[in-house]
Amino acid sequence: MNAFMKLALEEARLGIHSHHGGPFGAVIVKDGVVVGKGHNQVLKNQDPTCHGEVMAIHDACKNLGTFDLSGCEIYTTGEPCPMCLGAILWANIGKVYYGCHVLDTDKIGFRDDAFYQRFSSREGFCEQLDRDECLKLYDEYMAIEDKQNY
């Protein structure tokens, strides 16, 4: 068994036995060193965004003092849902290793596949509104010279 996946499994077990949420744990590794870990805390925090991968990203960013996790890999017990996959991409994590497939997750009562289907078409779900006013906000942001320290 892969040592990092073993740590992700241990993190997931900590979460389920603490009644924090589902069986999802993740560790983030950079240059062979664990820099972040997390498990599902949806129930604990009463927050549907507290998935294992997101919690691991929070931990790694805090530990490394950056929002850019380039050069990192993530090991997670389940195939990332669309939200987590988006977070992984925004964090610039270069490689994802997962244990269970989305269909395995479906079999234990999680509806990840429904989200994948929803993202195949946003028609009727997403609607553009007040674009001109929002573009003014974007222009305001672009006028800020030092965005790195903003």
Image (spheres, rainbow, N blue to C red):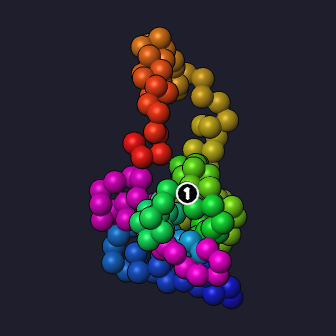
Residue sitting at x 34%, y 54%: 47
**Which class describes the residues within 10 Å of circle 1: few (<14), some (14-19), or many (20+)?**
some
Q: What amino acid does circle 1 point to? A: Asp
Say if the magenta span includes residue 46: yes
Say if the magenta span includes residue 32: yes
User: Is residue 82 visible from the viewing direction of this image?
Assistant: yes
Residue sitting at x 48%, y 60%: 66
Q: Nearer the viewer, residue 102 or 94?
A: 94
- Does residue 70 sit above or below 137 in this rendering? below
Q: Nearer the viewer, residue 124 or 130?
A: 130
Q: Mark 1 highlights which residue? A: 68
Residue sitting at x 55%, y 79%: 34
Q: Nearer the viewer, residue 103 or 95?
A: 95
Locate residue 37, reporting x and y percent: 48, 74
Locate residue 55, reporting x and y percent: 44, 64
Specify the quadrant of the image occupied by residue 62: bottom left
**Figure disc tally:** 1
Residue sitting at x 49%, y 83%: 10
Q: Nearer the viewer, residue 39 or 31?
A: 31
Is 129 displayed left or right of 17 in the figure?
Answer: right
- Does residue 132 sit above or below 101 in this rendering? above
- Does residue 118 sit above or below 139 in this rendering? below
Locate residue 7, reporting x and y percent: 54, 83
Is 106 displayed left or right of 22 in the figure?
Answer: right
